[in-house]
Amino acid sequence: MAFDFVPILIQALVAIIIAVGVIVIAHLIGSRNPTPAKLAPYECGMSPVGQAWRRFPIKFFLTAMLFVLFDIEVIFFVPWAAVLRHLRAGGSEYVLFALGEMAVFVGFLALGYVYILKKRALEWEA
Amino acid sequence: MTFALPALDWWAIAPMLVLVLTGCATLVAELVRGDDAGRAPLAWLTVAGASVSGGIALGQWDDPARLAFSDMVSSDRFTLFFTVLFLVVTCVTVLFAFEQLRREDFHPGEFYPLLAFSTIGMVLMAAAADLVITFIGVELLSICLYILVGFSRRRREPEESAIKYLLLGSFASAFLLYGIALVYGSTGTTSLACVGRALGAPGGLVGACEGAVATGSVATGMLLAGIGLLVVGLGFKAALVPFHSWAPDVYEGAPTAITAFMSVGVKAAAFAALLRVFLVAFPTLAPDWSVLLAVVATVTMVTGNTVALFQRNIKRMLGYSSIAHAGYLLVAIVAASHAGAASLLFYAVGYAAMNLGAFAIVVVLGRAGEERVAISDYAGLSQRQPLLAALMATFMFALAGVPPTVGFVGKFYVFSAAVDAGYVWLALAGLASSVASAYYYLRVVYQMYMVDPKEVVASHSPHRWVSLVATVAGFAVIALGVFPGGIIGVATASTSFVR
Amino acid sequence: MEFLIFSAVAAIAIAAGLLMVLQRNAMYSALFLVVVFFCLAVIYILLGAYFLAVVQVAVYAGAIMVLMLFVIMLLNVAWPEPDDRVLGLLRPLGATAAVTFAMLMAWALAGTPGLPSPLPGTSLPVGAAMTLGRVGEAQAGHVQEVAVTLFSKYLLPFELVSILLLAAILGASVLARKRPDHA
């Protein structure tokens, strides 16, 4: 039932309250004494160079795209895992069937994975 | 909660399985070899796989029609007919691509697996007995095409056309999915036959319709909205006006092999899906949608033929011409009859022959970097290459619909089906616009025979395979025009599910 | 109670959707889109489509948002300068099209005879229950129910999706590969 999700709702609310609360409290009780050095963005102690907005290499994009694709693959594991245990009751052929199904599914994606490894799509300097 | 082991009717999807194996085999071969040198094995592997797949499909011709895999796909003569057509188109595309990509000096091995996978998508669109499969077929085809369209190294136009196709195609997919959701919401099922039954269509191959609403209790408003969205989604793939704006740019920018593939194969797949969806799921609503489609068909024919008059690039001209032909094919669906469906199948075959032939000539005459694709480049071709010029003239006459070619017979069947269905005005509009189309087709013939060549061109490499395709296509265009009976008989047998 | 949650979440979703469209900075638009995704996930839960809610958060709010942010950064469209001449014409046209479409859908849904409420004892508006009504009706939103249907009836589409993903993997790496003259 939907009420099973009430803890998640409470957690989300607590997270929002803490996040907003910290900012508000910092604004209310913090003392402000800005200097140019303090206002500069923090970059690991180095002085900042240029803007954060610049063109990113397409490698980021490729990595993100492959992440989405494999993320979609993984999401199919969730229902599969949820049902596999119950299938044992039906007999071993049910379990084997489900395993075979997932093996075919993963097989195609494994081929894709071998492909991107071999084509060095995940290597930064390729 | 019961988990029933579904029946696995492998034989019913055997042609597709072979294509899956072909795609994976070419991918593995590409990985093992991994160099840009030898692409010939990949090309031949693809052709071999497609031939085996086509052989199986031909061998299944006398199998009983049935639904397979929990009523997801139908294994019937309609599926087999389009499977064979798609496989022929795929093989021809491989031959084109092999010549052309070698010439371009840019020949990634991924071309062949992607082509095989997109063929699976087309077969799925024709075989779909469930809207879920229709959608997956469309997506599989589209995703492969977004990549294939951009396959070129030298220029920016292919990338631009790929991006345009991707953006608009994604919108179209969303419309298609929304339409499917609304159809599901109003009927409680995505199975085409079950939707048909809920709407009171006479039986046929109907599977288990659990969850479907009872006949006659369908929410009509939502269903009509869904049908409208389906027209948008599939109409985009078929390049119907007003969803055609991507087509000329993409056809011009893509490698010629892919342009040929799209203008013949993808279009046929979109119409196979349209026919399945509208004549299996919604035949009882024909009075509602056929008027809408008749208007779309008219606009498509008129726009395609009018704008084609002004094109100077032959690929672009053929692009607009293929939009016009999409209009003719849609007329066959508007008829919503068995004769109309059979005429669509016949026209699809004839159009494949004449358009693939025309593109074969474009490939033979083209040079690296997509040069020599202006219509004026064909000036004086009859003096330099009389055989090629004669073949091109044949294809142009056929596309214009001049007897005794297949173009004439195809139009005759399509328009007479429309007249039988009471759409005399639609047939007249089609006739008028196809008469206008003769102007731009014959302009190519005029250039070839009446104008002197601009330049002396060095002799070409022989292009054995592409020339063979052109010759076979030229033969088919005439043979099917003179003896249409065989294919018409097969097409009629393939559409027996339409009443 | 559920109606209250639905109303609140739907209102937030609509507001965030509007803000997303009206932002000039694409980055802010993307962040508002995350809000819309989360609201949709809550609505899915209310409809009993739990698996879809998980997918919505994991795939859409997670992976696809990452992709979108990367694209925005890749294109570097921090300060777009809209051409007011073009937009001036397009805005009213787009608004008209959107309103027409919304009215058409409202008409289509309003003309629908009441479907059974997705969850017993809840009172969702018909329009909201519509998209997933039939899924909820059979309580099919539970992950196990989804799994049973997915791995038996929808076996073929399930396997085809893996081929679709394989094609997309190929495509992604072909597109991102360096070409000799672009290097």
Image: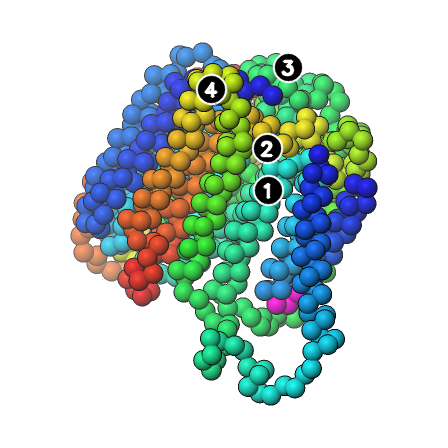
Dividing the picture into quadrants, the one containing residue C142 is top right
Q: Residue at x 57, y 16 (%)?
A: B207
Is residue C24 rendered magenta in the image? Answer: yes
What is the CA distance from the residue labelled 3 to the residue labelled 1? 41 Å
Which type of secondary structure does the marked residue at label 1 adopt? Answer: helix
Say which quadrant the N terminus of chain C sits in. top right
Q: Residue at x 47, y 27 (%)?
A: C156
Mark 2, other Cα within 10 Å: few <14 / some 14–19 / many ≥20:
many
Majority secondary structure of the magenta segment?
Answer: loop
Is residue B141 rendered magenta in the image? Answer: no
Q: Amino acid at mark 3?
A: Pro
Q: Find residue B389 and report its horizontal and vertical position in percent.
A: 29, 44
- Write the start and end of the magenta stretch as one range: C21-25
Q: Disc number at residue A94?
A: 4
Dividing the picture into quadrants, the one containing residue B10 is top left
Q: Residue at x 32, y 31 (%)?
A: B21
Mark 4, other Cα within 10 Å: few <14 / some 14–19 / many ≥20:
some
Q: Find residue A16 and report its horizontal and vertical position in percent.
A: 69, 58
Q: Amino acid at mark 1?
A: Val
Which type of secondary structure does the marked residue at label 4 adopt? Answer: helix
Q: Which residue is identified by label 1?
A: C54
Q: Amino acid at mark 2?
A: Val
Question: From the viewer's perspective, is residue B445 above or below residue B87?
Answer: below
Mark 1, other Cα within 10 Å: few <14 / some 14–19 / many ≥20:
some
Say which quadrant the C terminus of chain C sits in. bottom left
Q: Which residue is identified by label 2?
A: C143
Q: Disc number at residue B202?
A: 3
Q: Is residue C136 visible?
A: yes
| Chain of the residue that carries numbered disc 3 in the rendered image | B
Name the colour scheme: rainbow
